Amino acid sequence: MKDHIILPLEAVTMESLPLVGGKSASLGEMIGNLAQAGVKIPTGFAITTKAYYDFLHQSGLEDYIREQIANIDFEDITSLRRAGMRIRQAISSTRFPYELSSQIIDAYHALSREYGQEQTDVAVRSSATAEDLPDASFAGQQETFLNVRGPVALIDAVRNCFASLFTDRAISYRSTFGYDHFSIGLSVCVQKMVRSDLGASGVAFSLDTESGFRDVVLINGSWGLGEMVVQGAVSPDEFIVFKPLLDKGYTPIIEKKLGNKDKKMVYGEGSDERTKIIPVEKQAVHKFCLSDEHIIQLASWVNCIEAYYSEKKGHWCPMDVEWALDGLTNELYIVQARPETIHSRKDHSKVKSYVINDNGAPREEIVRGIAVGDKIAAGHVNILFSLDNRLNAGLGFQPGDVLVTDMTDPDWEPIMKMASAIVTNKGGRTCHAAIVAREMDIPAIVGCGDATEKLTSGQAITVNCAEGTEGVVYDGILPVEEQEMDLSQLPQVNTQLMLNVGTPSMAFQYTHLPNRGIGLAREEFIINNYIKAHPLALLNHRELKDADLSKKITQLIKGHESESDYFINQLAYGVGKIAASCYPEKVIVRFSDFKSNEYFNLLGGKYFEPSEENPMIGWRGASRYYSEAYKPAFRLECEAIRKVREQMGLTNVVVMIPFCRTVEELQKVLGVMEEFGLKRGEEGLEVYLMAELPSNIIMAEEFAAYIDGFSIGSNDLTQLTLGLDRDSSIVASLYNEMNPAVQRMIARLISVAKEKGVKVGICGQGPSDFPEFTRMLISMGIDSISVTPDAVTKTLKAIHEAELEAVEI
């Protein structure tokens, strides 16, 4: 086989990699082994490395290339660029040997006949042979040419693929890592095109690209050919699917985010124009590019590909996949698959985190976008719109500068590796800038929209990617503290340690922590940050005759069928992400507990909220759910929980009722929940009560008859037991969760819970702040303690010490 110039993809496997490179080998492997599982891959043929080496040998180019590389000053970008340009021009202008070209053309004609066409459309992809070097480990090392038709265009594309082995970034990369430039051969994959120019395309990963969470498939997609997603020219749609429930009969789509897909790449109209970029039709801009059925099908295929390669390699092998949806047939195809190389190599026993240590001083936010990585970096802004003009003008890029630009492409790699951080106007989590930033382990914020306008060259900024999926650029260089947690050194404990999780965007970041579930997930954060509108305003804005409000709500709900669907879906996705992060462990989701002044601040809230003298003890929690005024909004909350449990399959979600003053009130809420399809006990649904009022403790025996567990809210319980406003600085010194009165309250509740056989835990701030508080709870026999993620280490140690003391006693 080693003497073959042409091999059909069906004839190659991963063992053929030295001959056909990573792309072709992977495609052949999948065609041969995954077609029976329903995975569709377009066929084609591989032009082997023998053709590449024969071309170099017969043209006499090798000595010229070696001479050019030997003279490069790799500290001088201009020197690199000039040498790379000379090499590529020499290859592109060299005549292709007749014997080689005739075999390639014969294979192309055979492929065209297979599809019943005289000159079929093909993708011509470079496929390098070093398994740990090429496209698998570095974005855009070699070129791809789309919609290539006819023998002349095909030979030109093949020759340009050969030349692309000597792009500036490829030369620099090989030199940096000590690879011999001629030990890496180049094969070319010629593959039948999928008509995604009439459909959609994108990329998918079999893990979360930021946290490394392995139980999800992350899909990015946009209309038209996939280059727009890879280049970062559009902000794509994003879908996340929970893998463990894919084959259980559910639709476990736990996130759908609508991108700004205002343009697309399609086929060109002549031989000189293979592709072109056109605007997307207005109605399609705000429509998801994949149906739920296609999302699930694609996620299942990605999961199948990961499982196959993991078994073949004998270890977990997450995958980076390119997909295409044919607009003519409405069929999905996989057009590339390669191993993911960032998180699969990480040591997750050590967890690093980064915080801005400015003691709460006010920060000036300049711009925000999609966070890539979880670090924080600072530096001076260097705005580049192109490489040529700035470099030719002698305006250099200094190591440690923050690269700010519209979008990047592979030619920017020498600049990018000098940057402390990257900020772009365009792109999504799988665009070129994001992939390279992860590879280089530097923070990036992509898809900002207007970073090049809001930032000024030379300006000192801090780029913060450490607080979830949204990154923020702050003015000035802020102090940053790095923290490291060695999970292997943490003690094992018997008491259930759970987490308080505020934001769904951070949930996956915590999956490496040794927690056993989520003890408190607050709906308020999701409503405030992801929904942004008062639920009653969503339902009734048209009747209010407020044109500005209606305009803002119409903008918010794009991509959703209605206002109620928007609220239900957004809340369900937020809860779903949190529930997926620790499945099958319990996730206790607290129904909304906004006070009237907090609801007032939501979009449209002023029309529905009363003015209360003391909202802290006013219309909040349970009292809202059964009231005729708020009941329609509570229905939306119940529908969202039903979607998470029944459609997504995340039955580990437990619901919790907050600020419930009386047993009668609890009964009313349970009745309304049942009316809206949430009945305690059905499909295993558990209902907890937030024990935060003295009445909850005094009447604990009666409350226990209607619930499955208590969760102590020590913040409000302390406030109401001591009769003080915890927001008042005047009496703040009296606020103390270790006060004997509060301790007696907690002790009584734990005792009653044990007696009645219901679970009891705590989710207030006390255990996070005071190790002695944790020891007290352990001595009382509490079932679970839920703390903020930053308090896991000290709380685990406090639990361990308390458990040892209990054994000694």
Image (tube, grey):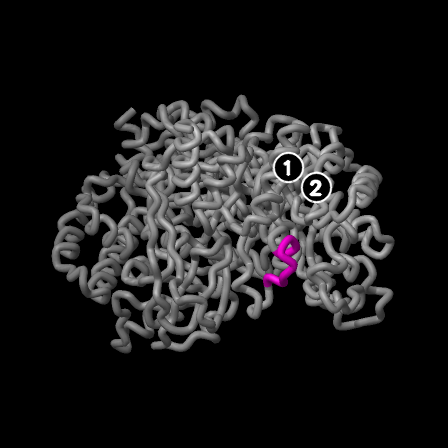
Which residue lies under the disc numbered 1?
Answer: 653
Indicate whether residue 724 is drawn in magenta: yes
Amino acid type shown at disc 2: Ile
In x, y percent, where is residue 110? 46, 32
Amino acid type shown at disc 1: Val
Indicate whether residue 426 is drawn in magenta: no
479 sits to left or right of 307: left
Up-down: is 576 above or below 28? Answer: below
Which residue lies under the disc numbered 2?
Answer: 641
Local packing at callout 1 (Cα closer than 10 Å; few below 14, some 14-19, many 20+) is many
Up-down: is 57 above or below 94? Answer: above
In x, y percent, where is residue 12? 38, 27
Check disc 1 and report its element: helix, strand or loop.
Answer: strand
Up-down: is 11 above or below 446? Answer: above
Highlighted range, magenta: 719-726
Local packing at callout 2 (Cα closer than 10 Å; few below 14, some 14-19, many 20+) is many
The residue located at (54%, 29%) in the rendering is 39
Q: CA distance from mark 2 to mark 1?
A: 8 Å
* The one of 18 and 34 positioned closer to us in this rendering: 34
The residue located at (18%, 60%) in the rendering is 74
Q: Quadrant of the C terminus?
A: top left
